[in-house]
Amino acid sequence: MPQLTDHGETDTTGTTDLTETTGTTDVQGVTDASGTAAAADGTGRAPARSARPDPADRTVPVGRTGDEAGSRGAGTWMTPEEYGASRAAVWTAAVVLVTDTDGRILVQSVDYRADRLLPGGAVDAGEAPSAAAARELREELGVDGRWPRGLAVDWIAAETPGFPPEMRFPGEILHVYDGGTWCPDRIAAVRLPDQEITGIDFAEPTDLPALMDPGDARRTLSALRARINGCGTALLEGGRPTAPTALDRLGVLRTRRTPQHGTWHRGPVPGHLPVRDRSAWLFAPDGRVLLLIDRDTGAALLPLPGAGPVAAEPVALGHRRTDEGVHVRSAARLTGLPPARDPAYARLLATPEQVRELNDWGRAGEDELASVHEARSALGLPVPERTPPVELPEQGLCW
């Protein structure tokens, strides 16, 4: 279904209760059967915002005659019809974020606008957002499934640029669901409809601002960071998190990831192969690892082997062979961190999976990840829980 062109307006908040008060009257107002004070303005009714309405309730407030109730003064008493009319109506939409095994994002081309979109569209009247997400993927990509995990909920204000006045855009609440990572076979099974969707592509996160509307690009990157964080649904306003995490503040994935696909090999590097660089998986006591983020670019990097004091000599983990040379990896357990030497880099703790997702390592990354967890187990460290990566203090720390 076309996005932001044919949405139906729906009242997503409902109305508020106006229930009959059955308590007794005192000089301050009315008390209901549970002993809770109702309106203190003498009307005998609780304010309209207090509870959900009974549509059949048309009773006269206790302590008032019909004439008195009809001539309301400065109180907050409303009929259900009046209260319903006072509530704002906004559009509602649902989209789905899908990535391939290289961490690129599925975007689709449509026949009614130039920029790219995530799969999804308007929520129909009476339809749950998650049901709309499933329906839209079935209609647009020919893919059946359920996508119950929310990544983000975005508030798009009515004054957002780009909406023509004749559209009378009232604002929109847009849900982003996690479509997961699709393997090549699943991508090959996509079937496009005869109209509306003209093609799909998988885009690098850094390319989204050039391909999408600015608000859509911000929202998609925020949702992707929320998925990597693993901390639940992010609340957004105009695509920006209301409570930014370290990944948001540092702007990870805003610049192109350096591909390091190649092949993963356990053990030492053969002498005839040129070594391009050396880096290390340095474990904290909880099983997370040290990760560096370039403050200027948002790029994610593994540290050098000597980035901090370790419990024992680093062990050779293996190496990755690429056209540019060999990338050597070692592993060790940290006992602490010295004060930061280079202010250009933020130091974070992240799970090995989060490090993998922030880099473009291809299939070799999965093979390397298996070796990393073998090393973690050999060091007697636990499997770390996925939580948002935490920025470490510049003054260092000890464990």
Image (spheres, rainbow, N blue to C red):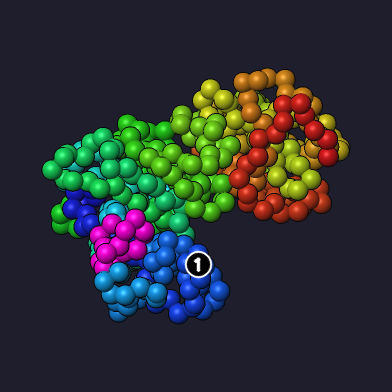
Residue 257 image offset from top left, x and y in percent: 49, 32
Q: Residue at x 80, y 33 (%)?
A: 397
Residue 26 image offset from top left, x and y in percent: 51, 71
Residue 100 vs residue 344, the one in the foreground: 344
Residue 288 image offset from top left, x and y in percent: 70, 45
Asked whether 80 falls inside the magenta stretch, the response is yes
Q: Residue at x 79, y 45 (%)?
A: 285
Asked whether 285 falls inside the magenta stretch, the response is no
* Residue type highlighted by circle 1: Val
Residue at image mark 1: 27
Quadrant showing the N terminus: bottom left
Residue 235 image offset from top left, x and y in percent: 46, 48
Query: Regarding mark 1 in the picture, which secondary structure is present there?
Result: loop
Quarter where residue 75 is shown: bottom left
Say if residue 365 shows up in the picture: no
Say if residue 390 shows up in the picture: yes
Q: Which residues are magenta?
A: 70-86
Q: Residue at x 28, y 57 (%)?
A: 86
Quarter where residue 238 is shown: top left
Residue 50 vs residue 187, the one in the foreground: 50
Relative vertical location of residue 328 with respect to residue 222 in this rendering, above or below: above
Residue farthest to the left, as pictured:
166
Q: Residue at x 25, y 60 (%)?
A: 85
Quarter where residue 279 is shown: top right
In the displayed structure image, the side of residue 390 where residue 11 appears, left or right: left
Relative vertical location of residue 181 with respect to residue 267 in this rendering, above or below: below
Residue farthest to the front, as pictured:
27
